[in-house]
Image (cartoon, grey):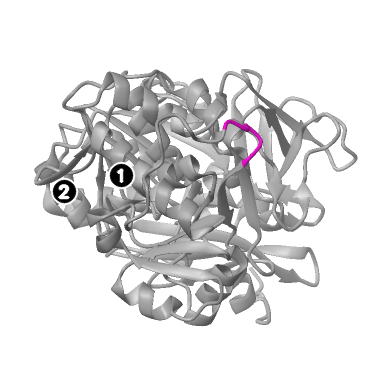
Amino acid sequence: MNLMMLLEMAATALGDRVAVGSSDAAVTCSDLMGRAAGLAGRLRASGAERLVLCDEPGAVLPVALFGAAWAGAAYVPVNYRLPDDDLRALAERAAPALAVTDDAGARRLAGVEGLEVVERDTLLEDPSGGAEAAGPGDWPSDPDAAAVLLYTSGTSGPPKAAVLRHRHLVSYVFGTVEFASAGPGEAHIMAVPPYHVASVAAQLSQVYSGRRIVPLARFDPDAWIDEVRDEGVTHAMLVPTMLARIVDALDRRGETLETVRFVSYGGGKSHRAVVERALEVFPAAGFSHAYGLTETSSTVCVMGPDDHRRCAASDDPVERARLSSAGRPLPGVEVSVRSADGVEAQTGSAGEIWVRGEQVAGEYAEGGSQLDEDGWFCTRDSGHLDEDGYLWVHGRNDDIIIRGGENMSPGEIEDALLTHPAVADAAAFGVPSREWGEEVAVCVVTRTPAPSADDLRELVRARLRSSRVPARVEFVDELPYNDTGKLLRRELRGRYASDPVPRR
C-alpha cells in the first residue's frame, strides 16, 4: 500500500484529464505520473530520506508529494512564513533531505547541513535533474512506511512532527472518495497552505477522483472569488476564517457564486451565522463541515450537504442549531466522549473526544504512538454527542471556561454574539476572577453602527443563561489567528489576564 497507487489508478484511467494547474498551465494525470517518476529518481540518487517542501500552493505540490512516495521518502511541507531561524531548525530536523523551494526560500535555507536545495521552477522543468527516472510500479509497498510528516504549530513548545503512514492516508481516501467520480469540467481551488493536513488530503482526494486542482498561492478573498470565476471552480475547501472573509467580500461586492457546487469547511470553529449567510451567497453549493486533526489524517466527522439543507430550513431551534455541530463520524471511524476518569460520558454530557479507525495515526516522530492499547486516540478537544449521534466540539480542553465550577464552551458564547448584525467576529475566553475562579471575557470586532457592551451582554443573557454573560467586553479591530485559521485564545488570555475584571 503506497500513495502512488492513487496516482497510478488516475493516470491509467484518466491520463488526459488535467490533474493540476490553471487553464493556461495545465498538468495532466499522465504528466504528473512522469514528473513524479523523474523526481523519485532524483531523490534516490541524492540519498535523501525526506523531501522538504518550502513553497506556496502551486503545481509543484502533487509532484513533490507523489515523487516522495515513489522514492520511499517522507514528504515534509514546512511553514515558509516562519522566521529564518525557526525555518532552518525544522529543515535541519528533516535532514538528510532534498528541499524544494522558491528563490527566496533557497537563500533562506542555504547552508543547512544535510540539505540539498533545488528551486521549484528548475524542478518542474527537469524533475529528474539528470538522474535515471524511477520505473513503473517500483515504489515501496510497506503500508507502515512514513508517507508525510506534518509539524504542529508549536503553541505549547517546539513543533512536533505528526507521522502519517501510507496506510492511514490511503484508508482516508478509500473511505471518503469514489474513484474517478469527478466530471471532466470539475475543478477544486486549493487555498490552504501546503503544511496543513487539508492540503495533503485535498491533493490525494482530487487526483483520485479526477478533479482538477487550481492552486491559489496567497489567500485573499477577492483574489479567491476572481480565481473561482476565471477558472470555473466547482469545489472548494476552506478554513472558517477564509469562509467568513469570502462571505463578507461577496456581500461587499453584491455578488453570489452560482458555479460552485460543493464547499467543505473545517479546521477551526465555524460560526452558525457565517454558515447561514454562506448558504445564501453560494446558492448552488452543497456544504460540508469537516472535523478532524492532523493526527487523524484529516476528517473524522462530517456534517454533510443534506444535513445543512435540512437544518437551515428547519423551524425547530434544536434542529437548526445543529449547523454548529461537527456532524457524525465517517464510516470506519468511531468517536467516544469520556469524562475525566475515562468513563464514557452520558449523551449530552461534555467530556474529552477520543477517536479510533484505520486512518487515525496518533503518532509523533519525537514521542511515538499516542494510541491506547485499544487503538483510541485522545484529541484533547472537549465536546459532547447528542441523542442522534452528532458531535459538538466545544474547543480545546485548555480553552474551556470554568466559572464557579461550571464548564462553559467559548463557542456557544461566540455563536450568540454573532447573531447581532453588527458583530463581524467574536472570541470568548476565561480570565482570572477572585470570586469565581474564572469569568467570561469577550473580544468583538464590530461593524457600524456598533453595539454597546451592555447590548451584547443582554444578547447573551437572552440567548443563553446569566452565567454566560461576559463580565468583560473589549472592542478590537481584529482577532489573532494563526496562518491556518485557528483563533489564538491564549494571546487574548495573556493580554487581559493581569487586568482586574470590572464588576457587573
**Residue 288 place in picture, x, y as percent:** 41, 30
| Label 1 element class | helix
Q: Looking at this view, is 429 or 395 the one in front?
A: 395
Near mark 1 (Cα within 10 A), the count class, few <14, some 14-19 or many ≥20, is many
At a point 35% along the width and 36% down the height, the residue shown is 276
- The quadrant in which the N terminus is found is top right
* Residue 35's disc number: 1
Which residue is denoted by mark 2 in the rendering?
227
Mark 2: amino acid: Glu
Magenta stretch: give its range. 141-145
First of labels 2, 1 by sequence position: 1
Tell me the mark number nearer the camera, choosing from 2 and 1: 1
Is residue 488 in view?
Answer: yes
* Vertical order, 479 against 45 (above or below): below
**Where is residue 275 shown, x and y percent of the image?**
37, 39
Residue depicted at x 50% and y 22%: 174
Residue under the point 13% across and 50% down: 226
Q: Tell me the amino acid under the disc marked 1.
A: Arg
Q: Position of residue 179 (x, y in %)?
A: 38, 19
User: Taking 436 as reference, is 276 left or right?
Assistant: left
Q: Give the camera-side residue of 59 and 265.
A: 59
Q: Is residue 327 visible?
A: no
